[in-house]
Image (cartoon, rainbow, N blue to C red):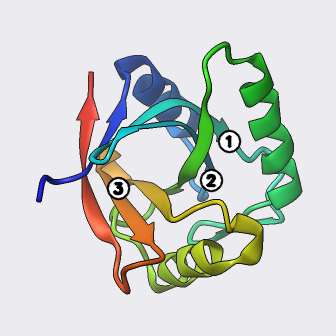
Amino acid sequence: MKRKKLQFSTEIIHQLFAEIKNERVENCGALIGKQIDSTLFRVTNYVKDDKPIFQSRFNIQRNTNNLYHLINEIVKKKEEEVDYIGEWHSHPNSSCIYSQIDFLTMNMMINDPDYSFLNEIILFIVGKNRCMNAFLFSKSRNRPISLKIIVK
């Protein structure tokens, strides 16, 4: 089986890194894009939750209503069809591996009736020293799989 991949443009990665560069607290948001085929997800945009419910050095609670509004604004402006494909957040004080809270949150989302349109959801994490990791959570698997990240 081919390894699944998450693709970003260089421009999007630079924008994201610039936006969280000097932050000492966690940030989060959503990934907008498209599943190109069975192995490739392409990120076309991201949104940053600028009104999180709670934010600290080691935790963030996203504002779902705010993110929903931000996502809809992007989807309306796009000429080609795009979808919500997942979440991103930063770990400015630790590695780019998902935490137990991240694991539980993503599994709750993938099994939430409000997300019934999703069979898979991506979690992209930016850690300290610009490390990056992406994980694919699925209704059909107990554990997420690691995605290969492509920047071009």
The residue under label 3 is 134
Q: Residues within 10 Å of mark 1 (few under 14, many from 20)?
A: many
Element type at marker 3? strand
The residue under label 1 is 48
Specify the amino acid type for callout 1: Lys
The residue under label 2 is 28
- Give the CA separation, mark 1 to mark 3: 17 Å
Residue plotted at (33% across, 65% down): 95
Element type at marker 2? strand
- Give the CA separation, mark 1 to mark 2: 6 Å
- Give the CA separation, mark 3 to mark 2: 14 Å
Specify the amino acid type for callout 2: Cys
Q: Contact (CB < 8 A) between labels 1 and 2?
A: yes
Which mark is on residue 11?
A: none
Compare marks 3 and 2 and give the one earlier in the sequence. Answer: 2
Residue 96 on image: x %, y %: 34, 61
Residue plotted at (35% across, 56% down): 134
